[in-house]
Image (spheres, rainbow, N blue to C red):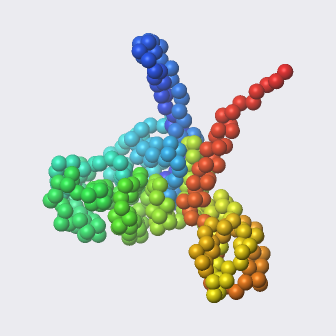
Amino acid sequence: MNAIEIRGLQKSYRVYQKKEGLWASLTGLFQREYNEVEAVRGIDLDVAQGEFVAFLGPNGAGKTTTLKLLSGVISPSGGEAHVLGHVPWKRENEYRRRFALVMGQKNQLWWDLPAQESFQLHQKIYRIDPEQFRRTRDELVDLLEVRHLLGQPVRELSLGERMKMELTAALLHSPEVLFLDEPTIGLDVVAQHNVQKFLKHYQAERKITILLTSHYMKDVVALCRRVVIIAQGEIKYDGSLAGIVDRFSGHKVLTLQFADGRMPGDLARYGDVLEIVEPKARLRVARSSIADVLSSVLANNTIEDVSVEDPPLEEVIAKMFAHTANEKKSEAVLPVETS
């Protein structure tokens, strides 16, 4: 059964184009120019109950707009969507109690009050049974190891500690669907790992449906099996992490460790030399040539160790984004007729 169903979802905005200069500003009071911006351009997407899906794309791709549509914050220009059987932008109270939205760049906690005060407010808003509220709160703060910080004003917490409190607040009413928009943005490596560990455990235990946007590929690798990539408001890929590499990368990284430090001087004939730290060398080799290259290297050299790896996921996705951006530029260039 699907928790999220999207068909032809669209969202466009009219953006006022303010011109420079006093006269232009005065003219703009009476005659304004607008551009139509298509943030989401007719996407189709199904997410099964209990799935943890990464929703990726470059800045301005339409990720956050899609999450706002699915959480009912904004209404679409066209198409339809159902989350747990509800139309999000109808803003039904029953639906509000079944999902949560966490945005890494926005706070839902009172800045000058301890987090426990905001938690009490959430309990009243969602009408959570007091005993259930205490059990859920205690479970969450223990899992996130923040019990000792409950009485401390939110403004005095570190960024990582605040994110843990934001997650606790979002999960107090035990939502069935969770939308996460850049939950680890700005966090250090340790804080990122702790948030990832918590999300992985909580999702596995509760089987909730999670749609995650993130620019940190380590979040995606640690948490998600399925990846949806959106660019220019359209879905460009929907599949596994491994499938991204297979589809958008034409090479592998070959690491060789030569015996006794005897390295050949013609490494470039095997592929592009990425790095040499004797007795090791790293090469970029075309996928179609990897078997032949390995055979040749092993036949002509004494090798102590060898590894063949896919390129880093960040590199592959960055290339895909660049390719998509170039396609858009090409479409924007109109042919010039000659007579």
Name the quarter where the C terminus is drawn: top right
Residue drawn 72% across and 69% down? 268
Residue 232 seen in the figure: yes
* Left or right for 101, reference 51: left
Q: Residue 287: name its quadrant.
A: bottom right
Q: Residue 297: name its quadrant.
A: bottom right
Residue 51 seen in the figure: no
Number of marks present in the image shown:
0
Q: Position of residue 24 (x, y in %)?
A: 46, 15
Residue drawn 36% across and 52% down? 104
* Left or right for 205, reference 310: left
* Left or right for 129, reference 17: left
Residue drawn 53% across and 33% down? 37
Q: Position of residue 42 (x, y in %)?
A: 58, 41
- Viewer-proximal residue among 294 and 113: 294
- Viewer-proximal residue among 178 and 230: 230
- Viewer-proximal residue among 37 and 21: 21
In the displayed orientation, state which residue is furthest to the left. 151
- Up-down: is 92 above or below 182? above
- Viewer-proximal residue among 76 and 281: 281
- Up-down: is 144 above or below 32? below
* Left or right for 236, reference 145: right
Residue drawn 69% across and 62% down? 250
Q: Position of residue 83 (x, y in %)?
A: 45, 50
Q: Residue 157: name its quadrant.
A: bottom left
Q: Position of residue 150 (x, y in %)?
A: 18, 61
In the displayed orientation, state which residue is furthest to the right. 339
